[in-house]
């Protein structure tokens, strides 16, 4: 993609998202600074409130930088979304160790950021 404005131009390379399929990522901008995600090839688990609550999901990758999360279990009390709901996540860019994404679920959309922590030592295959 190429963006042109006035007398200058800036090109944006598509992010390399394939490596994120086995990583631990921390949410940036949440009040719960303990929240993190283990992202795998075909599943994801989010841990909140120091691991007290979780969100589990199956993943269907629509390309290297886009996937659908089908929620399979949610233990967060009063959480707005439920098992069976599908969240679409599109990774827009990766700068240094920060992942910028756009999510949509049940008509609600938002942008967010995740920090790449390290490859996940997890049971994901």
Image: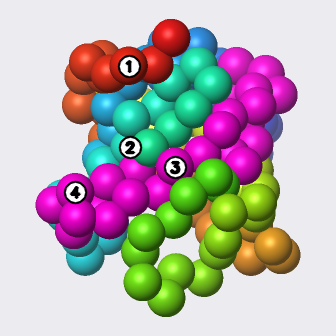
Secondary structure at numbered mark 1: loop
Instruction: Name the N-terminal-most of marks 3 and 2.
Output: 2
Question: CA–CA distance between discs 4 and 3?
Answer: 12 Å
Instruction: Name the N-terminal-most of marks 1 and 2.
Output: 2
Q: Are marks 4 and 2 in contact (CB under 8 Å)?
A: no
Question: CA–CA distance between discs 4 and 2?
Answer: 11 Å
When the figure is inspected, residue 17 is found, relative to residue 7, above or below; the finding is above
Instruction: Name the N-terminal-most of marks 4 and 2.
Output: 2
What is the magenta range? 46-70
Instruction: Name the residue that disc number 2 marks.
Output: 37
Instruction: Name the residue that disc number 3 marks.
Output: 56
Residue shown at 32% from the left, 54% from the top: 47
Q: Neighbour class for label 1 at 10 Å: few (<14), some, many (≥20)?
A: few
Q: Neighbour class for label 4 at 10 Å: few (<14), some, many (≥20)?
A: few
Front position among marks 1 and 2: 1
Instruction: Name the N-terminal-most of marks 4 and 3.
Output: 4
Question: CA–CA distance between discs 1 and 3?
Answer: 13 Å
Q: Neighbour class for label 3 at 10 Å: few (<14), some, many (≥20)?
A: many
How many marks can you see?
4
Secondary structure at numbered mark 3: strand
Is 68 colored magenta in this rendering? yes
Q: In this orientation, does residue 102 appear?
A: no
Instruction: Name the residue that disc number 4 marks.
Output: 51
In this figure, which colouring scheme has been used for the structure? rainbow
Residue shown at 63% from the left, 52% from the top: 72
Is 67 colored magenta in this rendering? yes
């Amino acid at each position: 993609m190429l963006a042109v404005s006035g007398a200058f131009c800036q090109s944006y390379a598509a992010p390399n998202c394939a490596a994120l399929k086995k990583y631990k990522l921390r949410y940036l901008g949440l009040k719960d600074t303990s929240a993190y995600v283990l992202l795998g090839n075909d599943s994801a688990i989010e841990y909140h409130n120091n691991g007290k609550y979780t969100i589990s999901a199956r993943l269907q990758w629509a390309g290297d930088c886009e996937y659908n999360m089908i929620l399979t279990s949610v233990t967060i009390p009063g959480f707005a979304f439920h098992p069976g709901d599908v969240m679409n996540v599109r990774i827009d860019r990766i700068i240094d160790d920060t992942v910028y994404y756009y999510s949509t679920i049940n008509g609600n959309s938002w942008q967010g950021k995740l920090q790449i922590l390290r490859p996940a030592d997890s049971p994901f295959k």
